[in-house]
Every structure is written in structure tokens, then in C-alpha cells.
Amino acid sequence: MSQRTFSIIKPDAVRKGDTGAILAEITKAGFKIVAIKKISLSKAQAEGFYHVHAARPFFGELVEFMASGPIFPMVLEKDNAIADLRKLMGATDPAKADEGTIRKMFASSIGENAIHGSDAEDTAAFEIGYFFAGLELK
Ligand code: CMP
């Protein structure tokens, strides 16, 4: 069944000029891009997005990084989108990511790992609503 997920091309990938190549992998894998934009987050906006990780030791570093430059948040759609995007992204740590995954190809470390993807339906709904208004999601 068709499903929507949320993804971000992170500041490291945007800085390196990998946005187009990552979007190509996503569309080749059968995802439809429902919405996409380029924005820069303030630290407070990055903290709000990653609030579930607030107690983690790496939270400060994560927020600093996500506010360090422009990102491309996007909404993607296909059958089984949430699980399929996680598979296409590969493991959080690029050193552990399978060949052919986006993190294997474009990420440099566990912190600077090129792409984010929602991990469940409830987080996808929160994350889509954090970045996009209903009118942008037709
Ligand atoms: P993401 O899928 O965007 O969700 C939470 C992020 O926290 C994760 O990707 C990583 O980029 C980051 N993260 C997870 N573990 C660590 C870590 N040990 N050190 C720094 N960042 C981390």
C-alpha cells in the first residue's frame, strides 16, 4: 500500500554537492517526490525536530551539525516507503552500511551521515508536519 515517509538531505551532503546524486538514487528506487524545499535550520528548530534524542550524549553535536548549513527536507511516497527508504539509506554508521546504500556512497561518519529517514509511521507524521503545511502535500 502506498505510504509517505519523510527524509532530509543533510548539510554534509549538500555542502559536498551530492544532492542531485542522492535524489537520483531515491527516484531510481521508485520513490515519488511529493514535496521538497531548501532551508537552513536554527539550532532551536533542529532541537525541536530531534527532541526524541534530547537525552542522548550526542544531542548537542547533532543539533549543531543540522544547523550548520542548508538542508533539503522532503516527503517521499511509494509502497512500503518507510522501510524501503531505511533500506536504501543503509546503517546509521556508514562504516556498517551495505554496498549500494546512500550512506555507503555519500556519508562520512555516524554524525555526518548524509540522509535522514523516518523510522515509523508516527515519527513520519510528526516529521512531515514539522516541515510542510497541508497545502504543500497534494
Ligand atoms: P538520523 O537518522 O538523522 O537520526 C538521529 C541522528 O543522530 C542519526 O541520524 C545520526 O546522524 C545521529 N547519531 C546517532 N548516533 C550518533 C553518535 N554516536 N554520534 C553522533 N551522532 C549520532
Image (cartoon, rainbow, N blue to C red):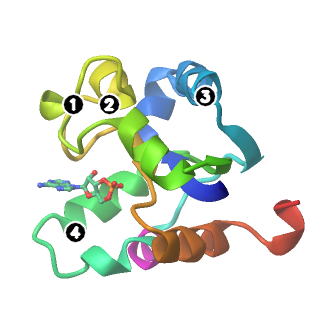
Q: Are marks 3 and 4 in contact (CB under 8 Å)?
A: no
Q: Amino acid at mark 3?
A: Leu
> What residue did someone put label 4 on?
59
Q: Around disc 4, counting alpha carbons within 10 Å, would you say few (fewer than 14), some (14 to 19), or many (20 or more)?
A: some
Asked if the stretch drawn in magenta spans residue 17, the answer is no
Instruction: Tell me the mark number nearer the camera, choosing from 3 and 1.
Output: 1
> What residue did someone put label 1 on?
97
Q: Which type of secondary structure does the marked residue at label 1 adopt?
A: loop
Q: Nearer the viewer, residue 108 or 7?
A: 7
Q: Are marks 3 and 2 in contact (CB under 8 Å)?
A: no
> What residue did someone put label 3 on?
23
Main secondary structure found in the magenta portion: helix
Q: Is residue 42 left or right of residue 106?
A: right
Q: Is residue 9 left or right of residue 96?
A: right
The quadrant in which residue 25 appears is top right
Q: State which tag comes first along the sequence, 3 or 1.
A: 3
Q: Quick check: can you spot residue 58?
A: yes
Q: Are marks 2 and 1 in contact (CB under 8 Å)?
A: yes
Q: Nearer the viewer, residue 3 or 75?
A: 3
Of the numbered discs in the image, which one, if any, rests on residue 117?
none
Q: Against 121, is 51 above or below?
A: below
The quadrant in which residue 52 appears is bottom left
- Quadrant of the drawing holding the C terminus: bottom right
Instruction: Tell me the mark number nearer the camera, choosing from 2 and 1.
Output: 1
Asked if the stretch drawn in magenta spans residue 44, the answer is yes
> What residue did someone put label 2 on?
103
Q: Which type of secondary structure does the marked residue at label 3 adopt?
A: helix
Q: Position of residue 109 (x, y in %)?
A: 19, 36
Q: State which tag comes first along the sequence, 3 or 4.
A: 3
Q: State which tag comes first along the sequence, 2 or 4.
A: 4
Residue drawn at (39%, 62%) of the image: 119
